[in-house]
Image: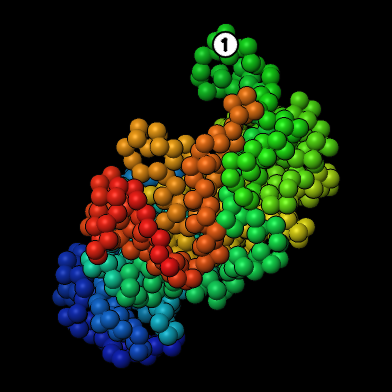
Amino acid sequence: MMKRRPFLASLATLGAGSIVSLNLTGKDNSSHPHTSIPEYWLEDGEANPQILKKIENEFISFTWYSDASATLLDKISNTSWAMSPVAYQEEESIDRGHVWVRQERSMCDQYPGRFRGELQGDEVKFTVLGLAKKIKGTFTCNVKLEKEFLIFQIKNIDEQLPNLMFPPHLESSQLVLPIGIGKLIRKPMPSRYFHAFFTHLNMRWFGGLKQDGKNGWMAIFEENFENAGISASALALVPAWQKSLSKWENSRTIKYTFTQNGYVQQAKTYRKHAQKIGLFKTLASKIKDTPTLQNMVGGRLVSIVASRAAERVDMQQDQLKPVDAEFEKTVGQLHVLNKFSTMPASIAQFKQAGMKSGIINIRGWGKGGYDYGHPDVWPPSPEVGTAQELKKACDAPSEFSVVLHDNYQDTYEHNPSFPQGINIRQNGEYLVGGYWDPGQSYIMNSKASIEFAKRNWEQIKQVAPKGMFIDTTTAMQLYESYEAGNTQTRKQDLERKIELIKFYKAKGLIFGSEESADFGIPTVDWMECRHKRIVGESIPLWPLVFHDCVMMGRYVSINESLPAEIAKSKSHPKHLEDMLWGYFMLYWGQSEENNTQLEAIKATLHVDDWFGKIATAEMTNHEFLTDDFMVERTTFDNGKSITINFSNEQKTVAGTTLKAYEYKISG
């Protein structure tokens, strides 16, 4: 049980803010944001938590209580906020050494953590209390004001704590999360979740809004963000801090600020932060450095799969699938879809269909077919063609930039380099990846990734690609390795992934990778993602921050843009989402037996035209124009905007009528 303390000494300001009121008796609690006080405070007649600190400046007033709750005032909008005294804590380490951190949590994983705080000089020492008021561990926290930011610095975390969720959530009516294109959560979440960098979170911030959707707050991860994530449940978002190689080393820092223009201002606030810390480079600058990137302005990307790996009986057995006679006919056969010698003709077909320019991404060109040989991809399989034929395919007309797909994260047991460079879990086992077409994958240490990439480039450079698409680099979470004498922290993993990208950029190549992650913005030219629209939930946070810094395309079926498919699905053509967000079209070239779907290319050339108008422009605004969220508008800094009706019914907005699935461009 906590005993009353006089708190008569050592209360001083933390940082630029100044203390404007003190509580030395523990009885000044009239402004406490929470009226339900836990039993452990009811002692010696003291029925409420004590004020530990009150600091303020011209932007923010912050009052902190000894249960870690707080009241905050955004002075710009005169809006009050309350910080909870409770934050769900995890019973065990979140990161169990798996390729994907288990996202959904349960009450068996978590408990409602409460806090007891006392001043120790300029810091507050908190004790974390679990169920039945059991003490789980301690940590210290500094808080200070710097202009419009309230900064929490967490230190001295007890090794008994496997993770730490702190500070508690700010009570909000809506939540803003940088997941996929962006999420606006309006209703309490049905479960509990952990979101990791960068598998789930593509930017290092999150936020909340009042019911009006205007006044809000946002938090930006700073120091040690590599060992962080977000704990999410109900309508609560909390920073989730993890150990590094099983140790609490260094401090963790996160800063909060307030906004008055909804999620758009939050995105723009993060954009300014990204510019300030060097997490920024415009497409205009990238095109100047690598002129072949200009081919994507007004163009699109076509992926051509050269070959796929041969099936094996043991792979079917591993997946508990029956091995029938039909399957056995193809066992051991490389599946050739597009030979190198036919690719120039395919590119000519794309051009004949109206494709003016773009990127041709050749996949499955390496030894053994798509994904099979990583990192031992050289030489190409002879069934697909020779290195000379691949070089001829790369030597396309100047308006097409031909790039090669590769991967320096996944590796397989059948490759000569196995198990060199694989991440080692804390229990001594290999870090297992996904089960893909070539079989069970394992995840490489990023130090080894760089070494293999440099080795392979000495061979690959002879075919003279215009660029490289290195899969998964910007898609996956950050990995640790416990290999004796070759450990890797999450921070080192991030640094090495950036080094890998810089290696290719130094060769004068354009560079692409998968999904979206803000660390790639200074170096990556395009990203191929799975962003999708969910009615009323999807908001374009990613393009609001980075549209003019990286070109984006989505893995969606181009066939859904054909009139017959639209009628069949009774839904809007998927390319409308690309147009709303300012993304390019991404098309998968078919095998030479099926030819290419030229009709689908012709049906979506208007997307290329629109992309050409806004490819390098900043997205400045997004709006829902109807209560059912079916009419949306995005605006760009060159004066152009697009309004789209995603409904299968006609809509009239501000005197303008849009038919079902119609869009209108202005400016």
In the displayed orientation, state which residue is furthest to the top. 325
Whether residue 616 sits left or right of residue 488 in the image: it is left
Up the image or down, 246 lies above or below 50; here it is above
* Image location of residue 602, percent across then percent down: 52, 42
Whether residue 623 sits left or right of residue 561 in the image: it is left
Q: Secondary structure at mark 1?
A: helix
Q: Nearer the viewer, residue 219 or 12?
A: 219
Q: Nearer the viewer, residue 619 or 151?
A: 619
Labels in figure, total: 1
* Image location of residue 227, percent across then percent down: 52, 59
One can see residue 187 in this view: no
> Which residue is located at x 68 percent, y 18 percent?
332
* Image location of residue 233, percent across then percent down: 31, 54
Residue identified by numbered label 1: 326
* Image location of residue 554, percent across then percent down: 50, 47
The colour scheme used to paint the residues is: rainbow
Image quadrant where one finds the C terminus? bottom left
Give the crowd class for mark 1: few <14, some 14-19, many >=20 residues within 10 Å: few
